[in-house]
Amino acid sequence: MAFGSFDNRNSGSALSEINMVPLIDVMLVLLVIFLITAPLLTHSIKVQLPQATAEPVDKDPKSLDLAVTEEGLLFLNNEPVALEDLTEVLRPYSQETPQPEVRIRADQETRYELLAQVMSKSKASGMVRLGFVTRPGADSAPAQNPDGTAASADVKAANPAASTNRSSQKESAAVN
């Protein structure tokens, strides 16, 4: 018997057996319940869908590439644009539905002031979706100062957009 016996030979020893019968009963009940309910969960209504021919929906939304060089020159879709004219050039695109995303590709040596002006003029034109394009794997390289020493700032903390990856091998962070 699993609970001990009446003879006093092993009265001081601990019981080392577990009664497995209740555990097996519970497992069999659970097995029966799952066997009964599994077909009910996968039950679906069979419907014959009509066949239609239509053009596929364009899955890639339109985007505008805005390149900013180290010298401060702007190029919208490889066409030169002056910073003063950026608001007027982007205004027609802001009226489109769906509105295209402006992808800012700036040189790493571009002044922050210029990028702030580009973002401000883009928002003033009515563009809602702005993003930065970076190189894939840029977050894995250690940041360096211009003199060649390692920078102390964490690249991921300074640029949280660098950790997202798109299927087009470009990374972009939405700025609203």
Image (cartoon, rainbow, N blue to C red):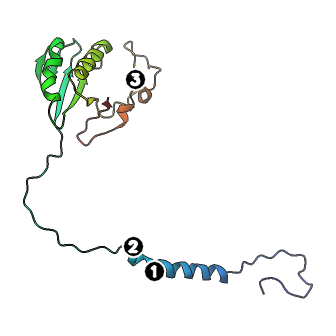
* Secondary element at tag 1: helix
Q: Secondary structure at mark 3?
A: loop
Please report whichever mark, 3 or 2, sits nearer to the chain's N-terminal start: 2
Q: Dot 3, how many residues are within 10 Å of its Cα: few (below 14), some (14-19), or many (20+)?
A: some
Question: Toward the viewer: 20 or 99?
Answer: 99
The x, y position of residue 90, in whole percent, is 16, 23
Residue 166 is left or right of residue 11, and the answer is: left
C-alpha separation, residue under disc 3 versus residue under disc 2: 53 Å
| Marks 2 and 1, the one that precedes in the sequence | 1
x%, y% of residue 120?
A: 27, 18
Mark 3, mark 1: which one is toward the viewer? 1
Crowdedness of circle 1 by 10 Å Cα count: few (<14), some, many (20+)?
few
User: Label 3 belongs to which residue?
Assistant: 143
Q: Which quarter shows the N terminus?
A: bottom right
Q: What's the amino acid at mark 2?
A: Leu
At x 74% / y 78%, what residue is drawn?
Answer: 17
Relative vertical location of residue 106 with respect to residue 29 in this rendering, above or below: above
Q: Which residue is mark 2?
A: 41
Q: Quadrant of residue 148?
A: top left
Mark 2 crowdedness (10 Å alpha carbons): few <14, some 14-19, many ≥20 = few
Inspect this view and state whether residue 132 appears.
no
Kind of residue indicated by mark 3: Ala
Q: What whole-number distance in Å separates the C-alpha atoms at marks 2 and 1?
A: 11 Å
Instruction: Provide residue 101's location: percent of width, then percent of height.
Output: 21, 32
